[in-house]
Amino acid sequence: MLYTVIKAVHIIFMVSYFAGLFYLVRLFVYYKDTDGFEETKRKILREQYVFMARRLWNIITVPAGIIMLLSGLALILLNFGLMKTPWFHLKLTFLLGLGIYHFWSWKKILQMKSLDGAELPTANIKLRQANEISTFILFLVVFTVILKSSVIEFWWQLITGFVLLVLAIMMTVKMVNRNKNKG
């Protein structure tokens, strides 16, 4: 029973954590979208986006991430056999990627805060593409957990499929952005 309760807590806070990441990177995009605005409007919006990003990070994303991590560690301690399964090693590899993405997001918040309303040096299209990374990590982790042993047999097909999906979505974002700039 305890294991199931902790697993439910882990899933709930995983959802909260990812929701925070999804919206956070959208705030980076919105901040960058103000580059062409007149100064007063740009300044007001950028201050608001920095405020929103910091609050989202400090009140939702990081606390949810900590609870997700602690409950995940508790699940491992209660079922240490997980550490012997290949699918779990794959999941941990994807979570390492999530940790890198988390660090990148934190650095972007610090960068936005330190710019004092100045332009983000990252290209808008790169921010839009980066917005999809957490989605793909979520897909990879969920499919790995659900498929468990069979994911090891077909891991290369799963990764290849997701890489192709990532490329297709990034190209779509690029085309939409290009059409948006023309119109």
Image: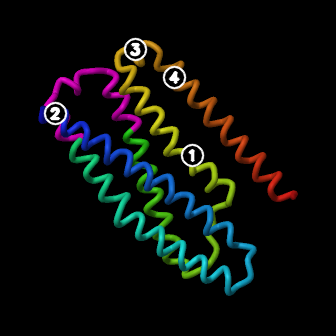
CA gap, disc 4 to disc 1? 17 Å
Task: Residue under label 2, please give it.
Answer: 3
Identify the amino acid type marked 2.
Tyr
Q: Which residues are magenta?
A: 72-94
Task: Residue under label 4, please give it.
Answer: 158
- Image coords of residue 95 (percent x, y): 37, 40
Q: Nearer the viewer, mark 4 or mark 2?
A: 2
Task: Residue under label 3, please give it.
Answer: 150
Tell me which residue sits at (82%, 59%) in the image.
181
Q: Which of pointers 2 and 1 lies earlier in the amino acid sequence?
A: 2
Q: Which of pointers 2 and 3 lies earlier in the amino acid sequence?
A: 2
CA gap, disc 3 to disc 4? 10 Å
Toward which corner of the image does residue 35 lie, by quadrant?
Answer: bottom right
Please name whichever residue, 3 or 89, is drawn nearer the observer in this view of the structure: 3
- Disc 3 secondary structure class: helix
- Please tell me how crowded label 3 is: few (under 14), some (14-19), or many (20+) other residues with Cα within 10 Å: few
Relative height, residue 139 to residue 153 (above, below)? below
- Please tell me how crowded label 1 is: few (under 14), some (14-19), or many (20+) other residues with Cα within 10 Å: some
CA gap, disc 4 to disc 2? 29 Å
- Disc 2 secondary structure class: helix
- Disc 1 secondary structure class: loop
Identify the amino acid type marked 3.
Ser
Q: Which of pointers 1 and 3 lies earlier in the amino acid sequence?
A: 1
Q: Nearer the viewer, mark 2 or mark 3?
A: 2
- In contact (CB < 8 Å): disc 2 and disc 3: no
Identify the amino acid type marked 4.
Leu
Q: Report if residue 78 lies within the magenta region.
A: yes
Q: Which of pointers 4 and 1 lies earlier in the amino acid sequence?
A: 1
